[in-house]
Amino acid sequence: MKKLNLLFVNDMLKIGITGGIGSGKSTVCKMFEIIGIPVFYADTESKKILYGDENIKQKILTAFGNSILDDAGLIDRKKLATIVFNNKAELENLNNILHPAVALHFENWVKQQNSAYVLKEAAILFESGAYKQVDNVIAIVAPLELKIKRTIGRDAITVEEVLARMKNQLTDEEKIKRSDFVIYNDEQQLLIPQVLKVHSLLIAG
């Protein structure tokens, strides 16, 4: 385990938490919330921005065209996903539009929190460059077969679709190398003791 890199902004330690599709990040984040740690869900915030920020919407329409709109004139995330998950250049283009806005929301959110540290949950924390906004990173990892099973059950998509999404994410091995802490959500090791261990290390500094 790496030595903590304690960089404080407004006396608030910012910790990234990431993991590939189906790794179970949400489950782990809920555990941190139960013990009083605020969690910023980057994907949830990006959805809010996608539907609520007219400036961002126009930038996305300029980049991807009106074909991604649904009958109500809203951006259809499934149509957009079909484009970006099969094209890394298009995915990068989308990230360049959305992630600066999400980063700004995160900084404003942090200022409103009052705890020893906060978590920023993001599936593509490293891929998007969002890791630069946090002081340390927790990686959530799980076996490939289990991640595929979880994702199919949650999103009702095919194995091929799951694998296509995974191609745009770093492998667990690479995430582990880049992270300061690792939590194994493999249904073999208990999650709560792992979460409490990371928590104790973070509050101890």
Image (cartoon, rainbow, N blue to C red):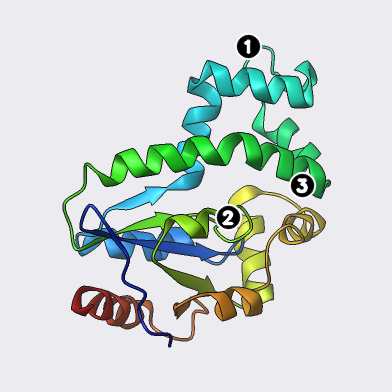
Residue 133's tag is: none
What residue does disc 2 label? 129
Tag 1, which secondary structure? Answer: loop
- Residue type highlighted by circle 2: Gly
Tag 2, which secondary structure? Answer: loop
**Real-space CA distance between mark 3 and mark 2, rounded to the nearest whole angstrom:** 18 Å
**Is residue 146 shown above or below 17?**
below
What residue does disc 3 label? 85
Q: Label 1 crowding class (10 Å Cα cut-off): few <14, some 14-19, many 20+?
A: few
Q: Which numbered disc flags the more N-terminal residue, 3 or 2?
A: 3
- Residue type highlighted by circle 1: Ala
What residue do we see at 52% from left, 79% from top? 186
Q: Are marks 3 and 2 in contact (CB under 8 Å)?
A: no
What residue does disc 1 label? 72
Q: Which numbered disc flags the more N-terminal residue, 1 or 2?
A: 1
Q: Nearer the viewer, residue 55 or 153?
A: 55
**Real-space CA distance between mark 1 and mark 2, rounded to the nearest whole angstrom:** 33 Å
What residue do we see at 55% from left, 28% from top? 50
Q: Nearer the viewer, residue 144 or 129?
A: 129
Q: Which numbered disc flags the more N-terminal residue, 1 or 3?
A: 1
Q: Please identify, in this view, whether the residue under mark 3 or under mark 2 is nearer the observer.
A: 2
Q: Are marks 1 and 2 in contact (CB under 8 Å)?
A: no
